[in-house]
Each structure stands twice: as structure tokens, then as C-alpha cells.
Amino acid sequence: MAKSNDDLVKEINELRSEMKQMRELLNMLFTIVVEQEEDEEDDYGFPMLSQDTPRFNN
């Protein structure tokens, strides 16, 4: 079934809109993951980088 140029333009515009929505969703998910990782770092910290870590070679 051949589509007219108008139909193709309409479909392209719909796909662009869907891609924009997916990009926005992906950005929100990325932000959530980054924020969770930052929260986990605050909760657990990195003992190897802490100044309170005991030094064995003093």
C-alpha cells in the first residue's frame, strides 16, 4: 500500500513527537538514577577516601 507524501509527512511528525517524549522520559530516568547514586554515596560514603580512615603505615 503506497502512502501519499502528506501521509508520510504526518507519520514523520508523529514519530518525531514520540521520539521527543521518549527522550524526555529517558532524561527523567537518568536524573532519577543519578540522584539515587548521589544519595547512596552520602549514606554509605567511601571509607577509602575518608580522612577518618585509620592509617596502618604511620
Image (cartoon, helix red, strand yellow):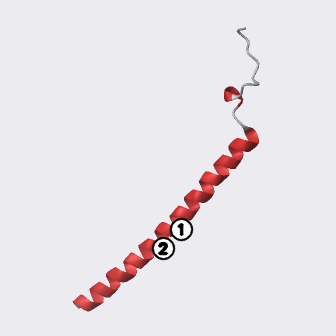
Q: Quadrant of residue 9?
A: bottom left
42 lies above or below 35: above
Which residue has dot 2 on it?
21
In the foreground, 12 or 27 = 27
Q: Residue at x 26, y 91 (%)?
A: 6
- The answer to whether residue 14 is visible is yes
Rendered view: 54 above or below 10: above
For the residue marked with disc 1, what is the amino acid?
A: Leu
Residue 25 versus residue 7 in the image, above or below: above
**Which quadrant would the C terminus be assigned to in this image?**
top right
Q: Is residue 1 left or right of residue 47?
A: left
Query: Where residue 4 appears, x then y in whole percent?
Result: 23, 91
Count of labels shown? 2
Q: Relative to residue 42, is residue 20 drawn left or right? A: left
Q: Which mark is residue 25?
A: 1
Q: Nearer the viewer, residue 3 or 21?
A: 21
Q: Are marks 2 and 1 in contact (CB under 8 Å)?
A: yes
Percent across and percent down for residue 13 are 35, 82
